[in-house]
Amino acid sequence: MDAMFGMLSDPDSRTMAPFFAIDFADRAEFEDKMAAMANDDTVKMYSMMAGGHFVGAIMTFDGPAGREVFYWIRRIAWGRGLATEAMARMLNIDHTRPVYAHVLSTNPRALAVLENCGFHEVSRRDAIETPAPDDEDILLVKD
Ligand SMILES: CC(C)(COP(=O)(O)OP(=O)(O)OC[C@H]1O[C@@H](n2cnc3c(N)ncnc32)[C@H](O)[C@@H]1OP(=O)(O)O)[C@@H](O)C(=O)NCCC(=O)NCCS
């Protein structure tokens, strides 16, 4: 939980993926949110482990578009292909399709992960509540 909290409260990472509507600087709120997700049968959380260490998480849940996926890697582990490998493994375990994902247009790493795993763009719209004024919220799907 400490590693998860550190990962989700990293300011730059939150700017890349502000979709979690929660203030992760607040540890108590984080604990409540994790407990609620653990008790929700529609939420599936996968931990990513590398070299015996927790390096990230993938979560699937029921969102407005349908089944959605959300993923996050600890900053110290970026750029090693771990997100792509973990996403591919998750998709081999969970065959629910279609599965959707939201990515900001200013987040090319996240876009590359999804496209490498066979997702394609469905639509885009102006992103709200992000620092970059021209940011777009891209919806992708894997059929
Ligand atoms: C996005 C995130 C998951 C990527 O994790 P990662 O383990 O570094 O990703 P990978 O190493 O598997 O793949 C990154 C891809 O981005 C590419 N990439 C890296 N920097 C890039 C850049 N500036 N422009 C374009 N592509 C870039 C890499 O080349 C790689 O693609 P490739 O495999 O085709 O070469 C990680 O940065 C993160 O957790 N960010 C915060 C949360 C987030 O953004 N989540 C996703 C939205 S829900």
Image: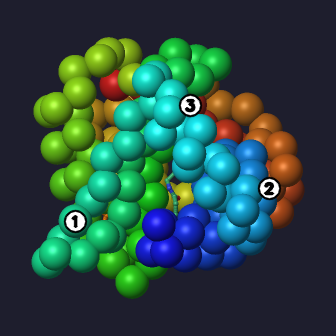
Q: Residues within 10 Å of mark 2 (few under 14, many from 20)?
A: some
Secondary element type, mark 2: loop
Is 3 rendered above or below residue 56? below
Q: Quadrant of ligand 1?
A: bottom left
Q: What residue sits right under mark 2 in the picture?
A: 130
Circle 1: residue type:
Met
Is 76 rendered above or below residue 90? below
Residue 12 quadrant: bottom right
Q: Are marks 3 and 1 in contact (CB under 8 Å)?
A: no
Numbered disc in front, either 3 or 1: 1
Q: Is mark 1 within 8 Å of ligand 1?
A: no
Q: Is residue 68 among the parts visible in the rendering?
A: no
Circle 3: residue type:
Leu
Relative to residue 136, is residue 79 drawn left or right?
left
Residue 109 quadrant: bottom left
**For the image shown, how many numbered marks are present on the structure?**
3
Is 69 rendered above or below residue 29? above
Q: Is residue 34 among the parts visible in the rendering?
A: yes
Relative to residue 83, is residue 64 drawn left or right?
right
Relative to residue 123, is residue 50 drawn left or right?
left
Residue drawn at 74 percent across, 71 percent down:
25
Q: What residue sits right under mark 1 in the picture?
A: 49
Viewer-side residue, 29 vs 118: 29
The percent coordinates of residue 111 (x first, y second) are 45, 49
Residue drawn at 79 percent across, 38 percent down:
126
